[in-house]
Image (tube, grey):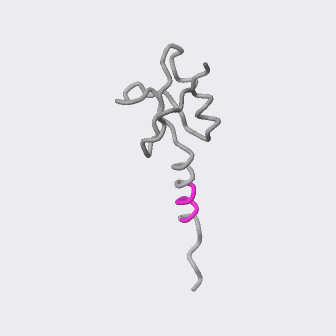
Amino acid sequence: MALPDDAPSDVPFSLVCQSCDAGIGIESFEAALAAGWTEVCFDPDLPMANFIGLCPECRQWEERQEGIHAQPPSAE
């Protein structure tokens, strides 16, 4: 099983989203990437997982928020 570059090879894969509690049931780094997760990295200090990342739903929400803030003000 492949892991992110920053992870020791003997660490079991368990994942949580940095913005919500998603990640239960994702069993591998490859499965996380295939499901659309980004920013997956090893975090040994997490209380309930070994890896943290950004789930597809939270990533889409962040992209929408960035788009809203990037829009020029209305000319009305």
Residue 19: image x %, image y %? 44, 46
Q: Residue furthest front?
A: 25
**Furthest residue in direction right, as rendered:** 34
The quarter of the picture where residue 72 lies is: bottom right
46 w.r.t. 70: above or below = above
The residue under the point 57% across, 55% down is 63
The answer to which image quadrant residue 43 occupies is top left
Q: Residue at x 44, y 26 (%)?
A: 50
**Is 44 part of what is drawn in magenta?**
no
Residue 68 in picture, x, y percent from top left: 55, 65
Q: Residue at x 41, y 24 (%)?
A: 44
Q: Quadrant of residue 34?
A: top right
Q: How many marks?
A: 0
Which part of the image, by quadrant, shows the N terminus?
Answer: top right
Compare residues 76 and 18 and report the one nearer the observer.
18
Residue under the point 47% across and 27% down: 14
Which stretch did the figure color magenta?
63-68
Whole-percent x, y for residue 35 in the image:
61, 39
37 versus 28 height, above or below = below
Q: Main secondary structure of the magenta part?
A: helix
Q: Quadrant of the C terminus?
A: bottom right
For the view shown, which residue lies furthest in the bottom direction? 76
Of all residues, the one furthest to the top in this rendering is 10
